Image (cartoon, rainbow, N blue to C red):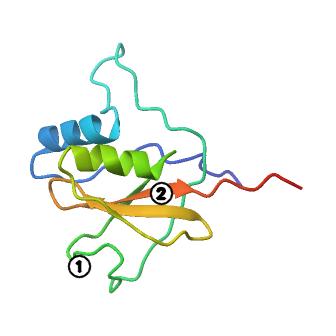
Amino acid sequence: MEKVTGIGGLFFRAHDPKTLGRWYQQHLGISLTPSSSEDSVWQQEAGPTAFSPFPETSDYFGDAHKSWMVNFRVRNLDKMAAQLQGAGIAVKIDPQSHPYGRFARLHDPEGNPIELWQPKVPDTKG
């Protein structure tokens, strides 16, 4: 069976797409979709990707009117959270370390939920 090789894009509606796009670029380092062949597209690092539909009644995303949440992998959750907080963005770090790693929550300027994930590095010691 042929399978997809990864997520090729994330598309969603916004009240002010240009401003919101700049926010993601400025605070999370995500390059916007190129407008010409000279511009480069955002390149993700290889790594795990969770793909999980949730029940309609789930409160995991916070606001019940939000039907999606994006989860971004980060190398250093504490440094990313400090950088965002330094820019005046509220970030809530989950105090627990989970089997999959560490997590934090924030919202973009339009209230869309964002989860940051620092995956747990496998112990390679024998």
At 30% across and 33% down in the image, what residue appears?
32
Asked if residue 20 is positioned above or below residue 121 in the image, the reply reads above
Residue 18 falls left or right of residue 123? left
Which residue is label 1 attached to? Answer: 64
Q: CA distance from mark 2 to mark 1?
A: 22 Å
Q: Which label sits on residue 7?
A: none
Q: Which x, y percent locates residue 5? A: 60, 45
Instruction: Look at the numbered disc 1 and give the secondary structure of its residue.
Output: loop
Asked if residue 18 is positioned above or below residue 34 in the image, the reply reads below
Q: Which x, y percent locates residue 15? A: 10, 52
Residue 58 falls left or right of residue 52? left
Hey, which residue is sitting farthest left in the picture?
A: 15
Q: Amino acid at mark 1?
A: Ala
Asked if residue 18 is positioned above or below residue 104 in the image, the reply reads above
Which residue is label 2 attached to? Answer: 117
Residue 125 falls left or right of residue 11? right
